[in-house]
Image: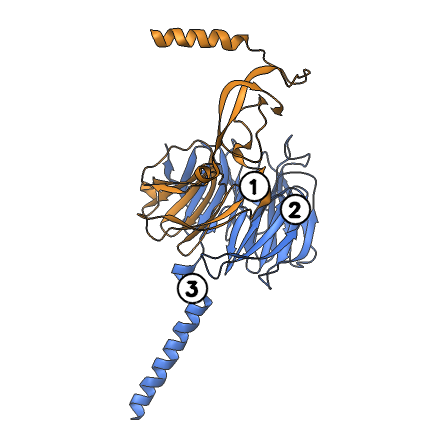
Amino acid sequence: MKRTLNKFIALLFASFLLWSCTKDGSNNAASAAGKGGSLSRFTIVGNFLYVVDNHFLYSYDISSPTNPVKTNTSAINFDIETIYPFNNRLFIGTRTGLYIYSIDTPSIPSKLAEARHARSCDPVVANDSIAFVTLKGNSNCGPAESGLYVHSIKNIFQPVLIKKVLINSPEGLGLQGSTLYICCNNEGLKVFDVSQPANPAEIRTVTGAYFKDVIPYGNLLICYVSSGIILYDITAPINPVLLKHITN
Amino acid sequence: MRLLWILIVISTFSSCWPKVKPGEPRNNTQKVFGYKPVYGAETFAKKIIYANTPQPVVAAGNIYVKGDLIYQVETGKGIHVIDNRIPAQASRVGFLTINGSSEISIKGDFLYTNSYDDLVVVDMSNINSISEVKRVKGAFPEGRTNYFFVQPPEPGYYECPRYDSLVIGWKKDSVQAGCYKN
């Protein structure tokens, strides 16, 4: 009898664990979101889809996937370009600055901070403590000095620029642990060691295409190039090995 | 031979059309050789079709990855689907036609994208019956006037598109050029 009871309790405990997994959702492959590049204007975090057009941040509740319900519209600025999620933050790149929003209340994102910069094009990726922004200054984007701009966000309310590395025509970027990949159009894909964020070390440049954006995805680096897609193995993150150029 | 004659006649006449250069005063009633919008009826332009026939990349756009599939926007036209089960052999396997599209995000079996000013949800659970399951019309008002095909592919004067219609492409023709692309 006691044995049966023990079994029953164990079963109950196990089912509770399983139940909490499915409820969490993020561990459930079937309902999980995928991964986008740094130039995206759509992103999904949990049960919410966030979209930026040039002026607004739209929040949609997609807990019923076929029935998106708009929960909020926030006017942010002119010339919004990109949105990047990390944990409970949204990093929004605009031509005049980086905006950080909290999604602690996912239906209504609230602004935490902004870091203004000279006019330019500027995708962003981030982790807990650092936001990496590339600024591209040209006739279309604005007069900023092109390069990698590293902001400390240890105090999320007050981003501090801690390093500027001048680079020609940087565009999309991707962060894998302490390795940062920066797409530099015709000049190739630059690989940086950012284990010391205030002092990024350029390791190598991969050339042979017009690089626009990247997604680090496990051991795979997916590159958006002007001709389509190139895949690299990044088992050794600082040393991308060509796997496949998907040609027409 | 006949084709050659037609070509010669066309090229001769096309060189007669006045070409307005940037900075020159323009007369809207004067016709020039330039780009003219090709409109699609709302129902046609916004129709979603999936085909297991890979399409060439013309204007590569945003990328997205989920599971064994990679997706890439064909700017303004739709989404390439790439089989990535074996990355070293990855290849385009299909194309999802969604005019006015530039973005992708996926959760579970559902792909979220834009089609001009609409938010569109596409059920990807069965590759043989991919279908639109929801459309939020006018979700992104800017998308009505700001989308890839709202301008022609090359610089120069062009016929301004009507914003009450959807442009699905451009053709060269004799046009009343009221707009200019740098």
User: The residue under label 3 is which amino acid type?
Assistant: Asn
Q: Which residue is mark 2?
A: A163
Q: Is residue A169 rendered to the left or right of residue A229?
A: right
Residue A12 seen in this snapshot: yes
Callout 2 crowding tier (Cα within 10 Å): few <14, some 14–19, many ≥20: some
Q: Is residue A22 rendered to the left or right of residue A127?
A: left
In the depicted structure, whether residue B97 falls above or below residue B30: below
Q: Nearer the viewer, mark 1 or mark 3?
A: 1
User: The residue under label 1 is which amino acid type?
Assistant: Gly
Scheme by which the image is coloured: by chain
Q: Which residue is mark 1?
A: B143
- Of A42 and A100, the residue lying toward us: A42
- SS for callout 3: loop
User: The residue under label 2 is which amino acid type?
Assistant: Lys
Residue B38: where, in percent of width, then height? 49, 28
Q: Same chain, marks 1 and 2?
A: no
- The first of marks 2 and 3 along the sequence is 3
Quarter of the picture holding the C terminus of chain A = top left
**Chain in blue colour:** A
Chain ID at mark 2: A
Q: Is residue A15 rendered to the left or right of residue A85?
A: left
Name the residue at 46% across, 37% down.
B45
Residue A236 seen in this snapshot: no
Name the residue at 41% across, 44% down.
B71
Q: Is residue B150 rendered to the left or right of residue A11?
A: right
Callout 3 crowding tier (Cα within 10 Å): few <14, some 14–19, many ≥20: few
- SS for callout 2: strand
Q: Which residue is mark 3?
A: A27
Q: Same chain, marks 2 and 3?
A: yes
